[in-house]
Amino acid sequence: MRRIHVGNALSAFGLGFTVPYLYVYVAQVRGLGAMTAGLVLAVFAVAALVVLPFAGRAIVRRGPLPVLVAALVTAALGALSLGLAGSAVSVLLSAAALGAGQAVMQPALATMIVDCSNAETRSRAFAMQFFLQNLGLGVGGLIGGHLVDASSVSSFTLLFSIEAAMFLLLVVVMVTVRMPRAPWIEGAPGAGAGKGSWKQLLQNRAMVQLCVLGFVLFFACYGQFESGLSAYGVEAAGVSTSALGTALAANTAMIVVAQFAVLKFVERRRRSRVIAAVGLIWAVAWLAAGYAGLGHGSQEMATAAFISTYALFGLGEAMLSPTVAPLVADLAPEGMAGQYNSAFALVKQLALAVGPAVGGPMGASLHGPYVVTFLLFSLGITYLAVRLGRELSAVQDRPWVGKSRVVAQGSASTAGQARARA
């Protein structure tokens, strides 16, 4: 598990190291223009949407480790070639390889966490993953920003070369991992059904409802961070670019500071109720955003309210990290964790592709409707979470119940205890 967490941190570091500077690199440093730079960012999303449906089946059949190694090598080649690419075609092809590799890393690493944890330790493991991802993104972005020079192509070549080296270093770390047999949750719908398929997944009503809920979560929060919400802050609230940077820092700081304190709070709460509470917290965040852009207070008050919006989003994210990913794992029948993780990652990518496209124009020009729309989406999260709770078994919604059952079954066989504990 320690090696897997190192892998999460390194992959996040590599992502934060280069992605914030892709637009500048393509449009200005390589002189390929804003259109090509926009296409590069779109290629990342398209590549993820193309490969993720196949990644789940590959993880089920081959195991997460070989798929992860293949994804890391692909991402390393994409990063290295992106640093050397000089034409639009080569830049787009390199971005496709890098985007595809990075997309497959997520469900592969998540499945490895599932296979190396049980119901008692899984929430804490995913909380640690989210903590390290945010820390890696922040540190990577900070170091990358000090290395790049918009007047020097070689500085960007160095940047992408270091990213490629990080992915290859992660290959070395990961090949030393010896994966245990995947644990599974007794009583899960479809447990023991054998080989996974998309048809079987779609027949799992709880998983389908979780995917719908996940789309709304990512669409209403993550899909707005760097598009609609930032445009709204600049245009409606009049915040400066430095204040926008402070808001993003407040989001990361909230996650880093609150993650493990929040974990203690949510570990003994029903997962569906925790997600419902996040919807209410984000509704308050959108109310703060509405005050920042539509209220009549001073500029200082508007800026403070806008920063509070990002901080409240961070609090909700810290509550989701030990809740949603373990729930995806516990909904998966035996041997299908890879397919379920990939399906949920696909939903996330769809939301992140649609979110900026919808929120960006609204946040820039339709200030009132923008806030009201996403306030309603946040309340919709609460409704969908409560509805999802009716589809979950007691162990899926309250994983500590499974732990207590193991204690009660003192006369059960060793194999039966191990299976129940998962």
Image (cartoon, rainbow, N blue to C red):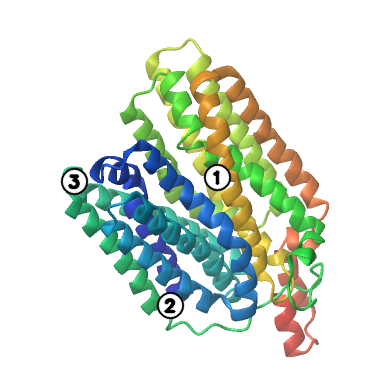
Residue 163 in view: yes
Q: Name the spot of residue 247 as percent of width and height, x first.
A: 40, 34
How packed mark 3 is, by other alpha carbons closer than 10 Å (few <14, some 14-19, many 20 or more), is some
Q: Which residue is drawn at 49% across and 30% down?
A: 229
Q: Check residue 11 in the rendering and tell me which mark sits there, or answer none.
A: none
- Residue 266, percent across and down? 62, 53
Residue at which label 3 appears: 149
Residue 351 appears at what percent x and percent y? 60, 45
Q: Which of 127 and 144 is in front in this view?
A: 144
Occupied quadrant, residue 346: bottom right
Residue 118 relative to residue 242: left or right: right
Q: Which is more N-terminal, label 3 or label 1? A: 3
Q: Which of marks 1 and 2 is in front?
A: 1
Q: Residue 326: tell me if it is visible.
A: no
Q: Do the residues labelled 3 and 2 touch (CB within 8 Å)?
A: no
Residue at image position (58%, 70%) is 111
Secondary structure of the residue carrying tag 2 is helix
Residue 315 higher or lower than 54, as above or below = above
| Left or right of residue 150, residue 270 in this image | right
Q: In which quarter of the image is residue 121?
A: bottom right
> Circle 3 — which element?
loop
Q: Residues within 10 Å of mark 1 (few under 14, many from 20)?
A: many
Label 1, label 3: how far apart the Cα atoms are: 29 Å
Q: Element at badge 1?
A: helix
Q: Name the residue under label 2.
A: 174
Residue underneath mark 1: 352
Query: Which residue is more in the foreground, 85 or 369?
Result: 85
